[in-house]
Amino acid sequence: MSRSAFRAHSLVLRHVQVRRVEDITPRMRRITVGGEELGAFARDGMSFPAFAPPAFDDHVKLIFAPGGDIADALPRQNANGIDWLPSEHRVTRDYTPHHVDADVLEAQFDFVVHTDGQVANGPAEEWARAAVPGSDLWFVGPKASLVLPDDVAELILIGDETALPAITRFFDERPLDIPVHALITVATEAAIQAIVTRPGDSADFVVAQPGDAEALLAAAQKLTPGEGPVYVWAAAESRALLPVRRHAKREWAIPKSHMAITGYWHVREESDADAATAEEAAGPVATPITSPVPWLATRAALKLGLLTEVALEPAPRAALERRANVTAGQLDPLLAILVDCDILRVDADHYRAGAVGDALLDDEHAQEEFVGLYADQVVALGDLADGLGAGGTGWATRTGNTLRDTVTASSSEYAELVDEAEGLRFLMPALSRLPFWADRSRIALGGPSALVVADGLRIAEIAAELVVVEDPEPLRALREGWDSDDLAFADSWPADTPILLASALEHRTDAEVLAHLDDLRTVTDTVYLMESTELDGLNARAAEQALVTLGAIGVPPRNLADLGRLVAQAGWSVASTSPLGWGVECLELVPAERN
């Protein structure tokens, strides 16, 4: 049984040319592109499938290089995926194909074109304004497709103009024969598009300024979901969606499994735009060093439950003090910082969530920036200097244990590593196509990504019996993360069985990696390592995360040479390496004496 709401696809870089340009409204330009690479094609000795975005909201990543050479901005294409290498000029934007015609090798993309000025709002609009037949375009994707639950009886689609390509595509292609209710905000009446509906459907437009959260919520509140299982899909400006997400969750009681709410764009404050313009004119500038106090205050508020206290209604100061189990007035310095950061707002000594606090309440992943295992690793950076100076790690200096020991002792801590591993789901098509699995009757899986791998192999119809192996507490977290009975779990490695370790080394020190690989030599003669070996060139926080890794395990993120050195020291040899994309490789290991 699949555990994912998405189906991953192998990423292919495609080069197309503009064939037609049409303004379908004063604010929407439809550009039809075409070319041989929309069909099955070959490049550099590798063969790739035809472009086929199956879901209505699939998006591809358009690649631009303002002021630079597009060749430097393009990702590296592998047989089964891509790697984003660092690029000074690369800018990417995600767009949903409005329509794909495989027979004539064409795809249509709709671009919002702002009419309130002559200056294009970003690289995609700039390209769309200048596009003429013959103009070049490079894109990658789609990375994955949304899979709606089987029980959906009604669909609600909410969005602004940027969501129109996905919404109109759903009505045009009609992948589900259920009632659909669409609500779209547009900047002017001239931006309204005709949508063909069926009996039981509705499609309503509301004129509102882009990013107007109040207008979007007011319109959504007029919708009344039916009694059957309802799925809510929404896409618009990211902050404007926060009230919609809250309304769907609290008032409509839509479960997380039946909701996909995605910020398609983000309002730039005027001061931000001015700063960006000044930075572009002056060249790169140093990142200012700001106080860590607001971050620590937010962490304290979450750990003390202050945001939970004000989640549903304003609370007096005394209620917050009782929640935190402190004396009167003791929280005052913390509350002052939280108000300054708009985590909280205060009115007549009653506190409620501010805009930032609301965002945290509505997004569990955003909370993990301040509490949880990764945030604990950030805090451990305070002991980085002492840890490295003593030949250890910042984490061990602060906690007295290695990170591996910590997660081995706590299923909840290990479960956070399992959650982080979900991002590797997009690499499963590449992994499942490797030639290693076809003739295997059984494969043992280890590491926080074991469930993602198991799901990927099952989707690819790999017939081998799969056994997930870990220490008792991590194994409990993995068991709780699997919702069917088609996977075995064990706390010891089965003999004479190939072992696939997925992200199993990233939370271990070098000494722990050596010990782990050495132990495996007694039970198997084949190990596959699925590990990140290059920084992701699209990850704006890659440098920050590398420092956190250094503080946690005492070494920077390991590259291919680092892994090869550890593998050799443990008595193994690398028989082959297979790039999976996004800087992740699969290494095939055999005993050194056999190679």
Image (cartoon, rainbow, N blue to C red):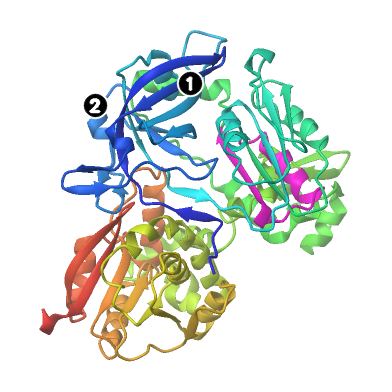
Span highlighted in magenta in the image: 237-265
In the image, residue 557 lies in the stretch drawn in magenta? no
Q: Earlier in the sequence, mark 1 or mark 2?
A: 1
Tell me, yes or no, if residue 286 can be seen here.
no
The disc label shown at residue 162, or none: none
Mark carried by residue 69 = 2
Number of numbered labels in the structure image: 2
Residue 580 percent across, percent down from the top left: 30, 57
Residue at 59% in and 29% down: 164
Q: Which residue, given by chain and number where applicable, does mark 1 sit on? A: 30
Amino acid at circle 1: Arg
Residue 238 located within the stretch drawn in magenta: yes
Query: In terms of image quadrants, where is residue 287?
Result: top left
Q: In this view, does 15 lie to the left or right of 308?
A: left
> SS class of the residue under badge 2?
loop
Residue furthest to the top in view is 118
Image quarter where the C terminus lies is bottom left
Residue 540 is left or right of residue 80, and the answer is: right
Contact? badges 1 and 2 (CB < 8 Å)? no
Quarter of the image for the N terminus: give it: bottom right
Quarter of the image where one finds residue 194: top right
The image shows residue 461, relative to residue 516, as above or below, that is above
Q: Residues within 10 Å of mark 1 (few under 14, many from 20)?
A: some
Residue 215 image offset from top left, x and y in percent: 75, 27
